[in-house]
């Protein structure tokens, strides 16, 4: 899940002071890391480079909280041999989600000359902080990504409407990239159901019940050591009750789940690029790298390929769902390089073995 928290305070000690030792020895380097920037991000004076704003704005930046689905977080606790690979996949997916936000959601409104324009701008510094537990000690792999309110080279602050508008698409890209990354680097196979529930094949649902993440109180902020976390997880596992392992669904890992894609767009009178990206990423059952998702969308929907900010060109529901095309040619391949051949062929079930999308 991706959440955007507005920051009006320049106090970053909440993050810079927490070394997140619960992941010590599992992640590459310290908890604090730069997506873009130099210096020691664990020091307040270096981390504060991120929080840039204008003289007129009270907002100094944003905390982009990007959390792994619970079954993926649970892998860190129950399969230590694969924990490092899972954390690496998470950090890679965090980077891809932030690249999307910077490319499509980071705009500054310019109202000079009587025109109201949206100008794209990058962040000069982006810092992130990787944590492995929630306040109650449950496995909860997540990053806090700090970005400034004023992009590099801009006189004013970013248009927050665009940042919030694109948050769901960025979250879908993160989850898609994470599913693909974990499957590529470990024996585990994460997948997403038609109902939007994230699973890991073979992982007992009892773990999700044991570490559900729901508490009446928020809990106190604690600094966990690796031994503390492992001991807490071992005590929790004494209460574990099996609920049955999740099995891999009979779906093609190479093709889009067209049924899920169409359902995600249902009810929208007009559809922007961000809606198509979100639906495509979520309909990649076993995941796909974020750049593969956006490349496929831009190849299939060139009319909205340059869209960014909140003033995006839109499609009709009919054009976005492409039902007539998929009825003829079958479900669309997730590999962007295969889309040209998909466009050229008529559907031949006996030749390629791809059935009608369910």
Image (cartoon, rainbow, N blue to C red):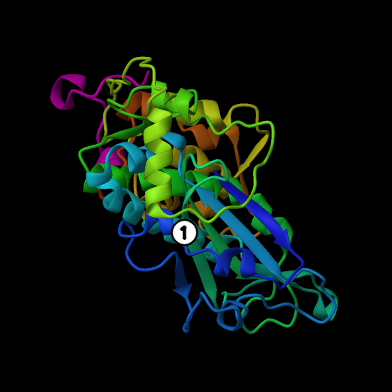
Q: Secondary structure at mark 1?
A: loop
Q: Residue at x 26, y 50 (%)?
A: 337
Residue 222 covered by magenta stretch:
no
Q: Residues within 10 Å of mark 1 (few under 14, many from 20)?
A: many
Quarter holding residue 7: bottom right
Residue 343 covered by magenta stretch:
yes
335 sits to left or right of 61: left
335 sits to left or right of 197: left
The percent position of residue 44, horizontal first and vertical second, equals 60, 78
Magenta region: 340-358
Residue beneath label 1, please? 20
57 sits to left or right of 18: right
Quadrant where the image shows the N terminus = top right
Q: Residue at x 50, y 65 (%)?
A: 128
Q: Nearer the viewer, residue 70 or 319?
A: 70
The percent position of residue 295, horizontal first and vertical second, equals 39, 54
Q: Nearer the viewer, residue 340 or 311?
A: 311
The percent position of residue 265, horizontal first and vertical second, equals 57, 32
Viewer can see residue 340: no
Q: Residue at x 82, y 71 (%)?
A: 58
The percent position of residue 334, horizontal first and vertical second, equals 32, 41
Q: Residue at x 46, y 73 (%)?
A: 34
The vertical placement of 345 against 238, above or below, is below
Q: Nearer the viewer, residue 191 or 251?
A: 191
């Amino acid at each position: 899940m991706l959440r955007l928290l507005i920051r009006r305070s320049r106090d970053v000690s909440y993050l810079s002071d927490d070394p997140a030792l619960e992941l010590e020895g599992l992640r590459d380097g310290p908890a604090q890391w730069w997506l873009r920037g130099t210096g020691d991000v664990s020091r307040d004076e270096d981390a504060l480079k991120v929080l840039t704003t204008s003289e007129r704005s009270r907002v100094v930046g944003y905390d982009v909280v990007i959390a792994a689905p619970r079954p993926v977080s649970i892998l860190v606790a129950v399969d230590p041999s694969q924990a490092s690979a899972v954390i690496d996949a998470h950090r890679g997916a965090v980077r891809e989600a932030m690249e999307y936000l910077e490319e499509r959601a980071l705009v500054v409104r310019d109202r000079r000359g009587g025109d109201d324009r949206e100008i794209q701008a990058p962040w000069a510094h982006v810092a992130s902080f990787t944590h492995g537990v929630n306040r109650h000690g449950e496995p909860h792999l997540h990053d806090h990504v700090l970005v400034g309110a004023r992009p590099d080279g801009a006189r004013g602050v970013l248009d927050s409407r665009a940042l919030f508008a694109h948050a769901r698409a960025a979250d879908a890209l993160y989850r898609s990239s994470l599913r693909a990354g974990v499957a590529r680097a470990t024996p585990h196979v994460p997948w997403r159901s038609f109902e939007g529930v994230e699973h890991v094949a073979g992982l007992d649902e009892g773990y999700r019940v044991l570490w559900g993440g729901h508490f009446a109180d928020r809990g106190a902020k604690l600094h966990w050591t690796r031994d503390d976390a492992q001991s807490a997880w071992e005590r929790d596992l004494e209460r574990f009750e099996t609920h049955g392992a999740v099995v891999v669904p009979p779906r093609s890992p190479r093709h889009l789940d067209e049924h899920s894609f169409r359902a995600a767009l249902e009810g929208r009178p007009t559809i922007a690029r961000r809606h198509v990206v979100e639906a495509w990423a979520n309909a990649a059952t076993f995941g796909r790298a974020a750049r593969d998702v956006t490349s496929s969308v831009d190849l299939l929907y060139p009319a909205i390929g340059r869209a960014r900010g909140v003033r995006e060109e839109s499609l009709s529901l009919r054009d976005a769902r492409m039902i007539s095309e998929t009825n003829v040619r079958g479900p669309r391949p997730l590999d962007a390089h295969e889309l040209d051949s998909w466009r050229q062929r008529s559907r031949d079930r006996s030749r390629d073995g791809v059935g009608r999308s369910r």
